[in-house]
């Protein structure tokens, strides 16, 4: 469930970042950066939660981890592309 929700939020964020506009004001930039940070934090939370779960099917756990990795990389690449700054959230190994 979380992965589908994450995908919806990512599409929303990418829509905001890629929408035609003259420039982004400080309020919009603050909102987007906060939204991004919350998503990265959520990915970290679920990554920790998965590590604590006793999933009966190992492939399900692996699939979830792969999808979280893909989502996190896509988020970070898009963020860096639009804001040209280093990321304030560290990636859990």
Image: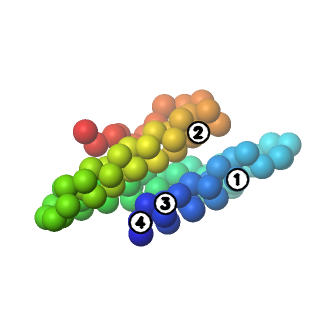
The reply to whether discs 3 and 2 touch (Cβ–Cβ < 8 Å) is no
Q: Which of marks 3 and 2 is in front?
A: 3
Residue farthest bottom in this picture: 1
User: Can residue 92 be seen here?
Assistant: yes
Residue 44 seen from this side: no
Element marked by disc 2: helix
Residue at (35, 40) in percent of width and height: 90
Q: Where is residue 34 in the image (x, y as percent from the top left)?
A: 53, 55
Instruction: Kindly identify which residue carries mark 1.
Output: 16
How many numbered circles does the render carry? 4
Q: Earlier in the sequence, mark 1 or mark 2?
A: 1
Return the disc, 3 or 2, that comes first in the chain's sequence.
Answer: 3
Q: Name the residue tied to disc 3.
A: 6
Q: Mark 2 points at which residue?
A: 78
Who comes first in sequence, dot 1 or dot 4? 4
**Mark 4 sits on what residue?**
2
The alpha-carbon separation of the residues under discs 3 and 4 comes to 6 Å
Considering only vertical position in the picture, is 49 above or below 68?
below
Q: Distance between the residues labelled 1 and 3?
A: 15 Å
């Amino acid at each position: 469930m979380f992965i589908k929700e994450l995908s919806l939020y990512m599409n929303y964020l990418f829509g905001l970042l890629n929408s035609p506009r003259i420039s982004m004001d400080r309020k919009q930039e603050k909102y987007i950066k906060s939204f991004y940070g919350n998503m990265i934090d959520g990915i970290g939370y679920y990554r920790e939660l998965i590590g604590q779960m006793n999933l009966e099917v190992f492939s399900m756990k692996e699939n979830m981890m792969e999808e979280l990795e893909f989502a996190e990389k896509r988020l970070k690449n898009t963020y860096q592309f639009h804001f040209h700054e280093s990321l304030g959230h560290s990636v859990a190994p």
